[in-house]
Amino acid sequence: MLSEPRSGRLAAWGNALLAGLVSPDDAVLEIVGDDAVHRVEGLPGESAPVGLTLALGRLRALGVGGLRVALPTPGHPLGLSGPAEFNARAMDAEEAVVCHGAAFGLVPEVYEAGPEGDVHVEVVWHVLPVREAPPADVPSLGEAERELAEALREATEVLSRLDVAGAGPVAEAAIDAYRARAERGREVLAPGYPPRAVRVLELAQRVGLLVSLAHENGHGGAVSSAEMAARAEALRPVERVARRAQVAAYNAYVEERERGVR
């Protein structure tokens, strides 16, 4: 959870573009990130995949006024509203973008291409119909911030109890990298988002960092299978809170529009 999901970049910078706060070229550059290319397949009126610039313009013409994020996992359809086909595709990808103002959703499919040593990533966003209904289990920014504060304490306690907090050079390197990114003042959301959304997303990423360290930093003090299972069980609700907060932060732009703030 250290890096932005592709759906987060598409929603955040797509919202900034729809609001007229960034140029199409800048939005596409930020959405693509380190990938080679993104295309959009299944747009109404298009028989073949198209580029992001054309796709975002076409979505605006179809009535899309904002973009939401969904980050579902098995048993937790976070941010989804149906129908079953879209939910299943989004669940497989563990992410999706849901349009506000028109009943469409976009699910990414990621490909690796190129010879060994020069592999690049290509992404195709599949446009599918969605049900116009409230997204599942998405908290408000205020709720997410309160949940995160408690989750951060719980994650720290769990890692300390299981002897994995900050253990070893891998953990130290991950923490140092996180701090370096924060100190560089990286823009975690696009222009137009409220400061609280930025704060919530940064905290969610911090909680996600701790969870990632627990899963990736060896067995630590949890030497038995029972202890390892206990660690996973203890961290599961913390990870769930962090994902809910991510979705709340990315969706804050649309939530403000619905409340008439914009």
Image (cartoon, rainbow, N blue to C red):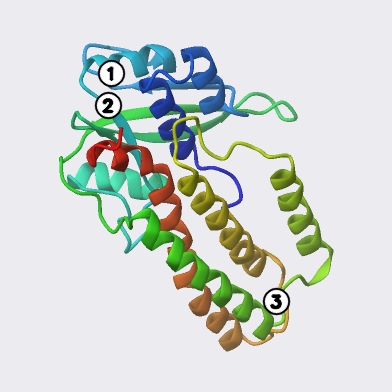
Q: Residue 64: x and y, percent?
A: 25, 25
Which residue is at 53% across, 51% downward? 199
**Camera-nearest label, 3 or 1:** 1
Which residue is at 72% across, 81% downward? 163
Which numbered disc covers residue 60? Answer: 1
Q: In the rendered view, tell whether residue 241 sits above or below residue 234.
A: above
**In front here: 206 or 145?**
145
Amino acid residing under circle 1: Arg
Give the number of callouts. Answer: 3
Residue topped by disc 3: 219
Q: In the rendered view, tell whether residue 128 sits above or below residue 222.
A: above
Q: CA distance from mark 1 to mark 2?
A: 6 Å
Helix or strand or loop: what does disc 2 sit on? loop
Label pair 3/1, CB-CB below 8 angstroms: no
Q: CA distance from mark 2 to mark 3?
A: 47 Å
Which residue is at 33% across, 14% downward? 57
**Camera-nearest label, 2 or 3:** 2
Q: Residue 226: x and y, percent?
A: 56, 88
Q: Residue 191: x and y, percent?
A: 49, 30
Q: CA distance from mark 3 to mark 1?
A: 49 Å
Which numbered disc covers residue 65? Answer: 2
Helix or strand or loop: what does disc 1 sit on? helix
Please tell me how crowded label 2 is: few (under 14), some (14-19), or many (20+) other residues with Cα within 10 Å. some
Label pair 1/2, CB-CB below 8 angstroms: yes
